[in-house]
Each structure stands twice: as C-alpha cells, then as structure tokens.
Amino acid sequence: MNVVSTPDGLAWLPDAPPSIERFLAPDLQPYPVLPLIGLILAVAYTTGWLRLRLTGRPWPAWRGIVFLLGCALIVVVMGAGIEGYGHRLFSVFMFQQLTLMMAVPALLVLGSPGTLLLRATPHRGPGRLILRAALGALRSRIARILLHPGFMIPLFLLAFYGLYFSDLATDLLASWAGHLGLELAFLAAGILFTVPLISADPLPIRQTHLGRFTDLFAEMPLHAFFGVIVMMAATPLVPFFADPPADWGIDPIQDQQLAGALAWSYGEGPALIIALVLLTRWFADDTRRATARDRQVDAVGDAELEAYNAYLHRLGRSDAERREDRTT
C-alpha cells in the first residue's frame, strides 16, 4: 500500500480509500507502540503460564486463551492498516477507542494476569522484588482511588463528552504524540473500569455484586447517549475529522454518523458480556453460601432458627399466661 506521511512525519496515512482488506493489511506505523505492548503482554503471560505447567501447577486454559485474544486484538486493531485510517476518520478512531476501552480490557481482566503473576513469579531473587512491588502497588492508596467508582465514572464522561465536545480532541489528535497518548489513555481507562467489575485477582477493595451492577449500568447509558448525539449532529463535532483526504472519498458527516452508531451499538456488546459474567458469579456465590449453610445446619443445627423458635415459644407462653390471668 502506498502511504503518505502526516505533517509531523511520525505516522503514515494510506492514499487509497478504506476497505476491509486495507483495514486488515499488516501495515505497521513507524512507531508501533501499542502493538509492541500487546506482544510484550502476550509473551509475559505465556511465560508465566508455561512456568506453572512445568512445575506441575494447574492454570485454567480458558483464562490463557481469552488473555491472548485480548493481546491479539490490540495488535490487529492498532498494528494493521486500520490505524492509518484512524488518524483521519472519526468512525475508525471511535471503533479503536471502543475496542481499547470495552473489548480488550474485558479479555485481559478475565485472564487473571495478577493471580498468574503471584503464582508464577519466583519468591527468591529478583522475583521477590517483583512480588513485593506488585503487592505494594495493590495495597496503596493510589490503587484504591483509581479503582473507585467515584474516579472511574467521571473518567468515562471525560473520554467521550469532555474529549469530543470540546477542542481537546482536535488539539491532541493533531500530533502523533497526542494520538498515541489518547490510545494509551483509552486502554488504561478501560482496564481500570473493568478490574473492579469482573477481576478474580486480589483487589484492595472488592465491591458487592449489587455495587458492581450499579457501576456497570451507570456507565452503559453514557456512551449510548453520546452515540445518539453524534448521530443526530448535522455539522462536524470534531474539526480535526472534518476534512479527510480527498482521495478517500469520505463524507465527514456520514462518517460522523457511523462513529455515533458505533458508540451506540458496539459499546453495548462488551457491557452485556460483563453483565452476564457478573450474574453468573453472583448466582455461583449465592449457591455456594447456601450449600455451606445447609452443611453447617446438618452438622450442628441451625442456632438462629432454634433461637427464633424459642422466642415464639416464649411469646406463646406469655399469651397463654395472660389469658389465664383474665379468667381467674
């Protein structure tokens, strides 16, 4: 594919109109930071997974598969030809944002990389320092703040409304560094939002199932309503995307409407998957607690029920004694 450089010379733009084939073409940018991050994460996770297998300790294969799928999604969405089109098309950039904030984090978090780190890292030598640093970061006040809903919900608002309904998007997207910074911020924000919801790793604070559902359903309408606003707009909302390359033959208003449709629809899919995971775990926890209580009752009896029956018995005796007093 022939390409042209952006004004800062640090990224390239395709000179042909977008198509599925060109989106998926393996055309790396001059500085493929996010694809490299995806590869590093995949290698590190696979190394830990293999170490557990070599030492005879089990690790769920499905967790490894979903984590590696998340890494592959980063590499494809940020390392193929689609990244070049994302430098000028609102719809493509919105697709990348939703992927980094909604789809990739769910896959990575379900892989439980934190638990794998704790189990696979040696407890001697450099491994001891790594574990100590990881546990220190987990127990820090900063971790509590970053994973708190009071921090995450405003961050999601900023990632959509604050970014695109101000000059912030145009100012940042005009440079390669700003474009890359936004992509990294999307991925980080998505992980911070997803971890408290479905992570099985150790956490500084673990919310109740009801609290997690509240957080999820507080976020879901945010990007859906944002998508409706973008679809209904008759003028370009982001000046940076108002003038795509003429050779691409793209109407910026139609492209903006497509971006809004993606924000409205694509973001709901990963959110529904997270909701199903939450429901499944909620049901499993309730079933586990009920089973444990039944076993305890079978073994030692139900002290609470016996105390309640004794209380009713005392009330019954008191009523009988009062009736007897009236008749005498």
Image: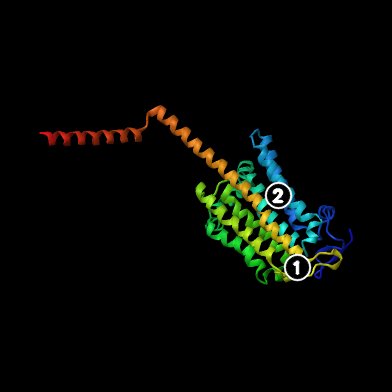
Q: Earlier in the sequence, mark 1 or mark 2?
A: 2
State which mark lies toward you, 1 or 2: 1
Marks 1 and 2, how far apart in space?
Answer: 32 Å
- Packing grade of label 2 (10 A; few <14, some 14-19, many >=20) is some
Residue 192 in sight from this viewpoint:
yes
Q: Position of residue 128 (x, y in %)?
A: 60, 46
The answer to which of 75 and 117 lies nearer the viewer is 75
The answer to which of 178 and 53 lies nearer the viewer is 178
Q: Position of residue 291 (x, y in %)?
A: 48, 32
Residue type at mark 1: give it: Phe
Provide the secondary structure element on which disc 1 rests. helix
Quadrant (top left, top right, bottom left, bottom right) of the C terminus: top left
Q: In which quarter of the view is residue 118 placed? A: top right
Residue lying farthest to the top in this orientation: 299
- Please state if 88 lies on the left or on the right of 153 as rendered: right
The residue that appears at 60% across and 63% down in the rendered structure is 157
Residue type at mark 2: give it: Leu
Q: Position of residue 254 (x, y in %)?
A: 76, 63
- Packing grade of label 1 (10 A; few <14, some 14-19, many >=20) is many
| Disc sitting over residue 241 in the figure | 1
The answer to which of 317 and 300 lies nearer the viewer is 317
Number of on-image labels: 2
Q: Position of residue 122 (x, y in %)?
A: 63, 42
User: In the displayed structure, would residue 9 be above or below residue 105?
Assistant: below
| Disc sitting over residue 8 in the figure | none
The residue that appears at 57% across and 62% down in the rendered structure is 154
| Disc sitting over residue 41 in the figure | 2
User: In the displayed structure, would residue 165 be above or below residue 189?
Assistant: below
Residue lying farthest to the left in this orientation: 328
- Please state if 271 lies on the left or on the right of 297 as rendered: right
Residue 125 in sight from this viewpoint:
no
